[in-house]
Amino acid sequence: MPSLLNAGHSAGAGSVADCVANIRSLALVGPAAAGKTSLAEALLLAAGSIASAGSVERGSTVSDFDPLEKRLQHSLTASVMHLAHGGVRIHLIDAPGAADLAGHALAALQAVDTAVVVINAATGIEPMALRLMAHAAARGLDRLIVVNRIDAPGVDLARLLADIQTAFGPECLPLNLPDGGASRVVDCFYNRDGHSDFGAVASAHRALVEQVVEVDGALVDRYLSDGDVDAAQLHAPLEQALREGHLIPVCFTSARSGAGVAELLDAIVKLLPNPTEGNPPDFLDGEGDAALLVHAQPDPARHVLAHVFKLSNDPYVGKLGVLRVHQGTLRRDSLLYVGQARKPVKVGHLFMLQGKSHVEVARALPGDIVALAKVDELHFDAVLHDAPDDERIHLKPLDFPIPTHGLAISPKRRGDEQRLAEVLAKLVDEDPCLRLEQVGGTHETLIWGLGELHLRWLLQRLRELHHLEVDSRPPRIAYLETITASAEGHHRHKKQSGGAGQFAEVWLRVEPLARGAGFEFVDAVRGGVIPTQFIPAVEKGVREALASGAISGHPLVDLRVTVFDGKHHSVDSKEVAFVTAGRKALLAAIREARPLVLEPIVQLEVTAPAGALGDITCDLAAHRGLVSGTRNGPAATMVVQGMAPLSELANYQTRLNAMTSGQGQYSTRPSHQEPVPPALQAQLTARFMQNDDD
Ligand SMILES: Nc1nc2c(ncn2[C@@H]2O[C@H](COP(=O)(O)OP(=O)(O)O)[C@@H](O)[C@H]2O)c(=O)[nH]1
Ligand SMILES: [Mg+2]
C-alpha cells in the first residue's frame, strides 16, 4: 500500500550531490502512443530506480498509476518522477499525449529546463509533435527530440531523420545513430569514427561539432585549424547552442528493447542543461503594461520563488501541489506565502514524487521539482515566495487552448448534487483546460473541455473512481430571436373579480435594429393616456417578453419598442395590469413583425493531413458550413479555416476522427449570429408552442 513515506526504490535520488549544477529537469511530451510512459519506465530501470520494468499493457508502470490510466492503457495526467545517475538528480515529467490533454503537457513545460519531444518511429511526425515543438520553442526551452520505437518493423529511420530536419530545421542533428539494425545506438558526439546503420559516424560527428562551434567565433577558428575540438571544450558552446535553439539534438531509442536508453541517460547527465544553463521562464511583477519582467536566478541563497504547475488530489494525502523551485531554497518547516495571501503557510513536509509514491526530502534547490501536501491555499499557477515584496510576482501567462466543448451534466441520483459539485471542482483544479459554468437559476452544470474525448474521460472518472452517475447532454445552443419588419401590437387587460378590478390598455410599435444593437425602449405616450408612473410597468412587461422570447423561447434582441397609446382607469389601473398589457401587446406585435430565430456561427480552424482536405470540405458543406481558406501546415498537414453553425458541430470531433484516422484537430471561436434555415425555425417554433401552454 502506498504511504506517505513509501520510499520505494528511490535509489536515494534525493540525496545525490546537493548542488544546483547536479540537477536536470525534463518533460517527456509528444503524441500519444509514442512511448513516453514506457521510456520513463526504461529510464528508471536504467538508473536503477526500479528493479524491473513495468509495462503500459499490464498497467504496471510507475508513471501511469491512476486506475483509469491502467484500464485505458494511456496517460491522462502528467506524472512526476525522479532518478539519479552519475551523481546527478534528474526530474522527469511524463505528460499525456492526447490533444485534449494538452493542458497537462503545456503545464509540464513550465517546470523544466528541457522539453524532450518523443516521436513515434512507426508513425512519423504527428501534429501533436509539431505543436509541442512550437510551444517549447515559444517558451524558450532547450529541446531534445527522441525517436522512439526504433525496433518497430519496417521503419525507415534515415528517412524519418530527414523528415525531422524538414519539419524542424537543419539544426536537428543526431547525438547518436542506430546501429546493428536498430538493435543498439552508437554515439556520434564523443565518437569521431566507427559505423552505424546510417553509414560512417565521422560525418554525423562533424555536422554536430560544426553546428556547436558556430556559436563561438574563436572556436570556429580552432576547429578549422585543428580539424576537431575536444569534447570538454564543447560543453559551454553546446549549452549555448541548445539555449539559443541553434542545436536540437536527436536521440534514438526503443523503450521496449532498451536500445539507446542508457545512452539517453548519459546524454541527459552530460549534455542537457542544469538550471543555470537553461532559459528560465519569465516572471512578471504586477499586472498589465506596468508589469516588470523578473528573471528568477537559480541561486539557492536568494529568496524563494517556486511555481505550482500541477495539482492533484491524492486518495491518501489529499490535495497535493507540485512545484518547481526557480530561485532560493525550500526547506521542511519553512514559512511561505502563496501569491498575495497575507498569512504564510507552513511547508511541513516536502516530497519528491515517484509516480504515486512520495519520498520525503529535507530541502529543494532551484531546479528541483517537489510536492507539498495538504496546503489548501495552493492552486494551479500559484507562486510561492518568502518575501512579502514578491507578492505580485507571477509566471508570464501561458497560452492554454480555450475549452470550447461543452456538456451539461446533472446527477442521476438525487442527493448527489453536493458531492458532484465538490468532485468536479477538484477535477477542474487539476486540468487548466477544463472549465465549469453554473447556469444561473437552473441546477444545470456546464463543463467545458477541449474535445469530446476530454469530456468522456471526465465522465468515466466520475463514474468509475467517484461512483457518481450523471446524465449528460449537449448544452443548449444560445439561439436568439429578432424581427425583420415593423409592426404594431395592442392589448387590453381587464379583470373583474369581485372587489377591485384590473385595467390597462397598451398600444406599441416594434422596429428592427441593426444586428448587435440590442434593445431600445421609447415612451411616446401623449396626453397622459398612460400615466407616467405606469410607464416603467409597461417596460417591465416588455422586457419580460423579450427575455422569454415570442416564437421559440429564446431572448429577443435588436429591436426598438415604442409605446405610443393606451388607456387607464382611475381606480382599477395598477402596476401589475400594465405589466401584463405591455407583455401581451409586445407578443402581438412580434407575431406581425416577421420574427426570425438566430443561431450562433463559429469560426473554425481544422488541422489535418492534407489528404483529408476534400472530405473535410464536403462534410462542412453538408453541415451548412463554409470553407474560407486553406493553407499549408507543417509536415504534410493542411490548415482549413471556415465558418459553421455551432449546432452542427455537436459531434464534429468524431466526424473528424473518421475522416483523418484520428489525426485531425480543430478549434472554434465565436463569430456572429445568423438566421436559421426555415425548416429549423419551424422545428424550434413547434417545440416551443408545444411546451408553452400559456
Ligand atoms: N515496439 C515498441 N513498442 C513500444 C515502444 N515504446 C512503447 N511501446 C508501446 O507503445 C504503446 C504506447 O506506449 P506508451 O508508453 O503508453 O506511450 P505514450 O502514450 O507516449 O506514453 C504501448 O503499447 C507500449 O508498449 C518501443 O520502443 N517499441
Ligand atoms: Mg503515456
Image (tube, rainbow, N blue to C red):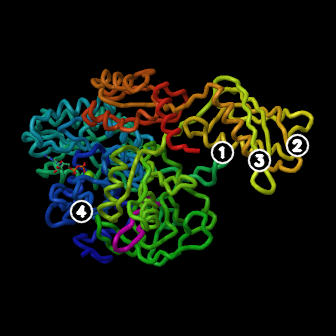
Labels 2 and 3: the sequence-earlier one: 2
Q: Position of residue 69 (x, y in %)?
A: 26, 57
Q: Secondary structure at mark 1?
A: helix
* Quadrant of the frame with the N terminus: bottom left
Figure check: 11 above or below 275: below
Compute the Cα span from label 2 to label 1. 53 Å
Instruction: Specify the segment rendered in magenta.
Output: 307-320
Q: Is residue 487 left or right of residue 416?
A: right
Q: Is residue 150 left or right of residue 462?
A: left
Q: Is mark 1 within 8 Å of ligand 2?
A: no
Q: Which residue is mark 3?
A: 577
- Is 315 magenta? The answer is yes
* Quadrant of the frame with the C terminus: top right
Q: Looking at the picture, which amino acid does disc 2 mark?
A: Pro
Q: Secondary structure at mark 4?
A: loop
For residue 531, which numbered disc appears in the image? 2
Please say if the residues under marks 4 and 3 sit with CB atoms less than 8 Å apart.
no
Q: Which of the two residues, 121 or 23, is positioned nearer the viewer here?
A: 121
